Image: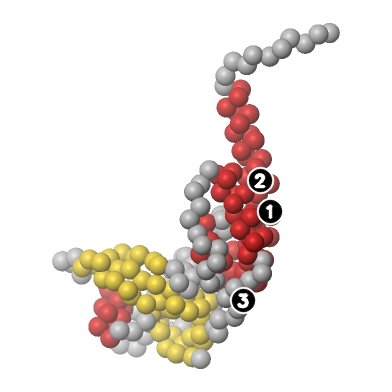
Amino acid sequence: MEKTLPLFPLNLIVYPGEDLNLHIFEPRYRQLINECLEEQKTFGIPAFINNKLPGYGTEMHVTTLHKRYDDGRMDIKSKGLTVFRLVNFENPVAGKLYAGGEVELVEPGETYSAHVDALTQRLEQLYDLLQIETDYNSNSENFSYRVAHKVGLSVEQEYELLTLETEAERQLFLIQHLNNVLPVVAGMERTKQRIRMNGHFKNLDPLNF
């Protein structure tokens, strides 16, 4: 399905179901958000990475106008709806300050995966090493989207995950990432322990030669 969206490129990845708070200050985006509020329409955040639009993004809905300032700036809360592929990009849209374009909405694939136990096991290992409290529900739909920002992915890796259409593909991607990351984090923790140990007097048994 294709549709036309006003576009707000950002150097970040937003996933379906994710809440995103934004401070709106540029005139072009104040115009864009005001129209979304007045006309109850959505907008798109295409990923802007390495000064390029690689093509994928997320359709967004403004859920709350948190604050409107006297000078026209706004604090808003928005939520990710659907992944899209850019068909064309017009900057600016005729008669507007902001960019826009035709997008193709990506049909969501399977939202659950049999890999969730393997992924959860690795997440628990990571958070245990980092001494971080876990706060997620592994039984939720599209679980990969809920934890993708919490496992140390680069923006390029987060973008790659956005392009994967099924939950199984995304969970396998995260499992492979964690397989690579866990030994590094564990090694860092061992190094930190050694550094802490070397900062204190140690009571060692004398060696017998």
- Gap in angstroms between the C-alphas marked 2 and 3: 28 Å
Q: Residues within 10 Å of mark 1 (few under 14, many from 20)?
A: few
Q: Secondary structure at mark 1?
A: helix
> Would residue 17 appear left or right of 28 to someone viewing this image?
right
Which numbered tag is attached to residue 180? 1
Decide: is 120 above or below 26.
Answer: above
Q: Residues within 10 Å of mark 3 (few under 14, many from 20)?
A: some
Residue drawn at x 51%, y 47% as measured from the top left: 132
Q: Nearer the viewer, mark 3 or mark 1?
A: 3
Which residue is identified by label 3? 166
> Would residue 200 appear left or right of 34 to someone viewing this image?
right
Which residue is identified by label 2? 184
Q: Nearer the viewer, mark 2 or mark 3?
A: 3
The one of 121 and 19 positioned closer to us in this rendering: 121
> Would residue 35 appear left or right of 43 to someone viewing this image?
left
Residue drawn at x 57%, y 75% as measured from the top left: 111
Q: Secondary structure at mark 2?
A: helix
